[in-house]
Amino acid sequence: MTNRSATGRANRCGVTGAQTRMPRWPSDVRYVLGLLALWLAGCGPSAPPPAADLLGGPPAQASGFAQANGFAQARPGMEISLPRDLGSHLDYRLEWWYLTANLHSAEGEAFGVQWTLFRFGLHAYQDAARPAGWYRDDVWLAHAALSRPGQHRFASKWARGGTGQAGVTLAPFSAWIDDWQLGADLPSQDPRVDRQQGDSGSGDWLLQARADNFAFRLQATPSLPPVRHGADGFSAKSSKGGGSMYFSFPALIMRGQVTLDGVTHDVSGQGWFDREWSSQLLQPDQQGWDWLALHLDDGRRLMLFRVRGASPFYAASLIQASGSSKALNPDEFSLQPLAYRDSQHGRVPVRWQVTVPAQGIALEVSAWPGEYWNPGRLRYWEGPVDVSGTHHGEGYLEMTGYGD
Amino acid sequence: MNLGRVYLSHYQRHPGQLVGLLLILACAAMLWSGVQSLTSRGAASIEASLQAQVPVLSVRRQDGGPLRVDDFARLRRAGFCITPRLDLQLAEPQAARRMSTSDDRQPALRLLGLDPLTASCLPVPPGMDAASEHLAQQLSEPAPGGAAAQSGGAIMGLWGTLPALQRWRDWMPAMPAEYSLHDVPELPANLLVGDIATIASLAGSLGREARLELLMPAPLAQALPTEYEATLYDYGVSSVPLAHSFLLSLEALGWLALLVAALLVRAVYLFAMAQRMNSLEILYRQGVELWRLRLYLLLEMLLLCVIGGALGVWFGHGLAGLLADGFRATLAGLFSVQGLGAGLSAGALWLRAAIILLVLLGWACSDIFMLRAGVRPASSSSAESPWGWLAGVLLMQAGVLGLMLDLNTPLWLIFIATGACLLGAGLLLPRLVSGLLQGLLVLLERGSGRRPLLEWSCSEMQALCRLLRLPLLALAFSIASAIGIQAMVTGFESTFVRWLDQRLQGELYLDPGRPVRLQDWVAPLQALPHVESVLPRVRGQALVEQQAVDVLGVDPQSDLVSDWEFLQAEPQPWRALQGQGVLVNEQLARRQRLKLGDWITVRLGALEKLYRVVAIYADYGRPNGEILLAISHLPQALPGRYTTFVLGLTPGARPDWQHWTQQHAWLAGSRLRDQASLKSAARAVFGRTFSITGALSGLTLLLSGVALGLMALALFRLRQRLYTLIHVCGLTRTELRWRLCAHAMLLTTGLAVLATPLGVFLSWVLVARVNPVAFGWALPFSLYPAYWLQVWLACLLVGAVTGLVMANPVRLETLKND
């Protein structure tokens, strides 16, 4: 799932967010935000800002905006086709390519890596083969974060669609913004890799990002085929309708280097790649979500989320070590917070109980010590977790809609 | 009786004194706070432009081709922090010009497209920050409805000053309403800023080419791909030290006004104390404790300070408002510092003014603590101490020595040295006047036959000179500064006009409005009716000894340069220009200490050559260094190359040049102006520059004149008993009155004459020492006796008015006790 990316997007594209933060920001940031707001005038005085609409807002108004700007809506019954759907969906308002990884150095140090590329459409368009130029059709945003227990580094980049500064290609697959990229690398030589991922459209991927005080360069090799969440790829976010198209590569073999404060570490581990697109995610009464992607030590993977609202909405997928997957009904699993942590942005649940009784799974999931906020007005928590209980493991926890 | 009421009763009896004190305090606070407000705002904007002017690199393709979006993406993907700027020049359309009643074509409107998503690579350009704030405000209160629906939700905004926006409306009446316009006064004139997509689509709809620039911060962190090279786009801050010097000059004028005011306040207060001494003595003898007398005097001073200061700061705010436009134009015109910053807040200004006024009053009222302490107030000492002479001479010597130092003396040291000279002169001048009168008296006494009235006049004037020492000194300083500033301004004006005539020879100036090839234009221009000569002028950028300079290329054989005058030149510099000669402007010569015959390395784009300095020319009005080369030496790829033309017309011919751009298609989009209007525009800019200094010196002179009048009036009242005695001795009222009037006139005029050398000295300091540091160029030093005459006449008038207001010097009742 990845309503999460919507949060990150909303943090910055949300015009209201830019305004309210502006007075406290340094002048160069205000400048950028102001001009961004200028640019995003396309979000429009007469139309709600896309983020606000995506995160809530009356459905009629939201769909009105989407229709006025020609956006398509994700619906049950739509199909996911690979490798096509690794590429952009220009007729949707929001989409993302989202990779998280739990890594370990030879010395036993643990690292977490997040890299996300968002695309925000200002209006739908189809002509992907238009000449490069200065357009006002979509915005690209990337987030990169490197975490260690008690430490979290974050950076972001912006780009305008249509110039080639950011984009996604299919053959070979590559998603980039400036010199940050996730894309095809050399074919995998790793004997552990099961060649079932034919529809991923590529062999190994190379993930690289560089910021002032951290960097990473990692090879990611999908070892399991992609998983379509929800109803064959349509992932509902509410019982009232609304949702996204959502699939994942739940098992990536990761290896490479991370650099923190000038010190480079050789690392390896496992990663999770999400691909999701939508034109409307949340209902007005929904405040945010808690999302977990877990790698268990028996080779199984779990994705679970809870959308918090008047009546919480739950969804989950269980992926077997063989790669087969099953969407779990809400009565087949439970996801409950056990303990909270007081953070700089309010109380957040950092220990969770996860059970899937029919599968013999009863887990306690704990966030690493520290805080893992990615900044922004609608800031979100994106941090690694450890798993204990009937199984051991690791994964990532994302939480949105908490704090002031 | 309440002590406060006793004190108040003094001012009730002498309301003029109260008004005088308040007036002086208010004027001092006004001048000082007005200048402070302006200079702090100027300093804030200089600071802002300093931040905005870190060196910026501009990327170019090695093959010379125009940059495209692909180049931007390629460099971004290679990890360079590049931000694009799309530059679209809009000339005034023919239709708009026909509607206009004026013959003058308006300057082109520059539309600058920014990419906010990558703009953080570079610091905020001045005014843009305000634009973004403004935008945020606008977006937080979105207008209902709007044009979003028609344009698919894309409202296109343009940000600029009101005149620029108005021109946009006038020039583009047919443009759809989807361009929302926002006023940002801080942006440079003629500039509209918008999103890069807005400008691109605008260029597309107008069918115009917009020029793409790719900018990045210097220095380069890694090598650019081989197809590209980086050139310095903005050299940054070379004019900033000059702008600081300018502000310091202005502040020094403010402090001079304050010094004059301090002298006046002290003088007025000493008079008031002299008048009140008897009543204070009576109060003391009645049993009022000394500390209470002092405390109430202090409270009185504080009250005066608060009222005068508040009035002054309020007036100062108004003064700053009046002068702000000229000041802004000066900063922009001379130093390329756009707009005025926020500067000091009203509270901070008021607090500073209060502190300074308190210091000023503290000095003025220092005698309060000596009340009845056996120390006589300074003004009552009649004996001239030799220490005063000595201190005056030493101070003047030290000051003159300071001013004679090397030309690279910092401005503050020049001011301190000048201050020492002024103080020395202040100590010497009254003694000199007194000495002269004493000498006259001795002569009269030795002369054949006693002339008692003349002797009395001499001793009376001597007494006046001693009693009015401080206000006279203030007047002397005001006279000196008025003479000094006038000499500088007039010298500047005449030199500048001569220089303009020289630089703007020929009748018409043609700006093609776009980069053009020289050879394509010269022949057609010569074929235009009544055009006698064509002088192409190429401007660009170069490096001289690694310093950025402007380049001006002209044809050395043209008739239109033959009359140039140089500050220094070898014989036949224009001929030398065809070889390895180069002309440099005064600013560059001063900065790099160049002299005739020096060899300098000049980098013109990729070309680097050695040139020999064959002449140094005056170049007023801007701080940049400039070199002048023969046009044939300039490479086609000269950075920033831009060609304009000067056209000489057949004498007496009046061609219909205003319509040439319509009659000749190849001239469309270009701009023709007659040189006369250019000259008047340039003179207007410099007129504004010196309106501030003129206003300040005029106000200071007025203030000291009025103060002297008030004080003399008070003094005459004090001495009424003496005058009555003279009357009793046989002098008629009218005779006495005219004699007193003559005393006043003689004294003020004599002072003005004696202060004139001080004024000349000040003008030399301003022209030869302050100006090169503050503005980057020196001016010829000239004397203007006609203006001295005016000042002397003004002083004569001050004396006459002072004498005349003393309506009746005789009051017989003052003698009733004798």
Image (spheres, coloured by chain):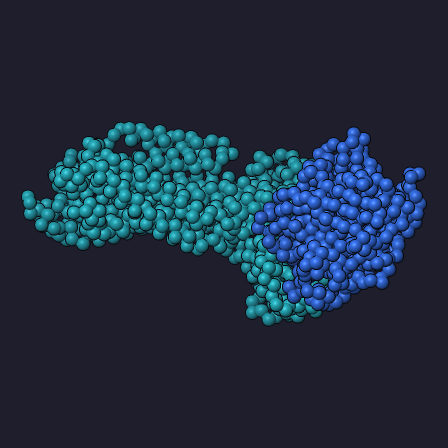
Q: Residue at x 25, y 30 (%)?
A: B385
| Image x and y of residue A171, in percent | 89, 51
The relative height of residue A2 versus residue A206 in the rendered view (above or below) is below
Task: Decide if residue B472 is in sight here.
Answer: no
Q: Looking at the rendering, which quadrant does residue B663 occupy?
A: bottom right
Residue B380: x and y in percent read 21, 36
Q: Nearer the viewer, residue A220 or A162?
A: A220
Kindly tell me whether residue A328 is visible in this rendering: yes
Q: Residue at x 70, y 67 (%)?
A: A60
Report the residue at 61% width, 68% height from top.
B144
Q: Nearer the viewer, residue B531 or B72?
A: B72
B290 lies left or right of A280: left
> For this view, does B608 lie left or right of residue B462?
right
Q: Return the x and y of residue A80 as percentages of the image width and height.
A: 86, 57
> For the point 42% across and 52% down, which residue is it?
B317
Q: What is the display colour for chain A? A: blue
Percent position of residue A215, x then y: 75, 39
Chain letter tied to cyan: B
User: Residue A343 or B367: which is nearer the viewer?
Assistant: A343
Q: How many marks?
A: 0
Residue A238 against residue B258 in the figure, above or below: below
- In the rendered image, which quarter is residue A388 located in? top right
Relative to B445, B434 lies left or right: right
Residue A245 in the figure: left or right of residue B9? right
Q: Nearer the viewer, residue B329 or A349?
A: A349
